[in-house]
Image (cartoon, helix red, strand yellow):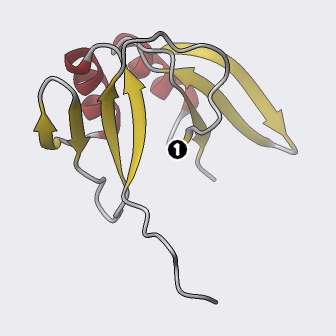
Amino acid sequence: MSEPVVVMSSVVLNVRDLERAKAFWTEVLGVGVNHEVEPFFAWLAPQEGSKVNVALQVVADEKVGRNRVHIDSFVPELDAAQRRIEELGGTHVEDHEIAGFRWRIMADPDGNEFCIAAEG
C-alpha cells in the first residue's frame, strides 16, 4: 500500500439555504456544527468513530441532474428512516434492490441525493 496523496476530511454539499441545510443535516446525522463562515460555509462535526464530516457550501444555482458523488449510509429500518428524513424536509427519490441488498435514494431539501440502506 502506498502513502496517500490526500487525507479525506469533508464531503461538501452545495446548498442554497445554509440555515435550512444545517437544520436538516445535523438532525439526519445526529451531529452539531463544528465551524461556520456565515453566510457561506458550515462544517458539521464528524459522526462518532469517523474522521470524515459533511460540510455545507452556499451556491447561487439550483441543482441540475443527477449527483456524481453522494453519501451512502446504513439505517436500522428503511421505512422509519425514510419517514424521519421526510419529516425533516427530505424527499424519497427511488428504491433499489440487487441480490437481496436493498437501498433507497433520498434527497435533502436542496435535491442532493444520498442513499440509505438496510443494515445486515
Vertical order, 64 against 117 (above or below): above
Is 112 displayed left or right of 16 in the figure?
A: right
* Residue that label 1 marks: 73
Question: Tag 1, which secondary structure?
Answer: strand
Instruction: Give the answer, above or below, for where 25 lies relative to 111.
Output: below
Q: Residue at x 23, y 33 (%)?
A: 41
> What is the x, y in percent for residue 23?
22, 22
Q: Position of residue 106 (x, y in %)?
A: 56, 22
Q: Quadrant of the N terminus?
A: bottom right
Residue at horizontal 34%, vertical 64%?
A: 51
Furthest-bottom residue in this view? 1
Residue 7, position in %: x, y? Answer: 43, 69
In terms of image quadrants, where is residue 38?
Answer: top left
Tell whether 117 sits left or right of 54: right
- In-image side of 12 versus 4 (left or right): left
Q: Is residue 81 above or below residue 33?
A: above
User: Neighbour class for label 1 at 10 Å: few (<14), some, many (≥20)?
Assistant: few
Relative depth, front residue between 60 and 107? 60
In the rendered structure, which amino acid carries the disc numbered 1?
Answer: Ser
Residue displayed at 50% across by 41% down: 75
Corner quadrant of residue 100: top right
Residue 20 sits in quarter: top left
Q: Where is residue 71 drawn, in percent x and y?
A: 53, 41
The foreground one among 1 and 26 is 1
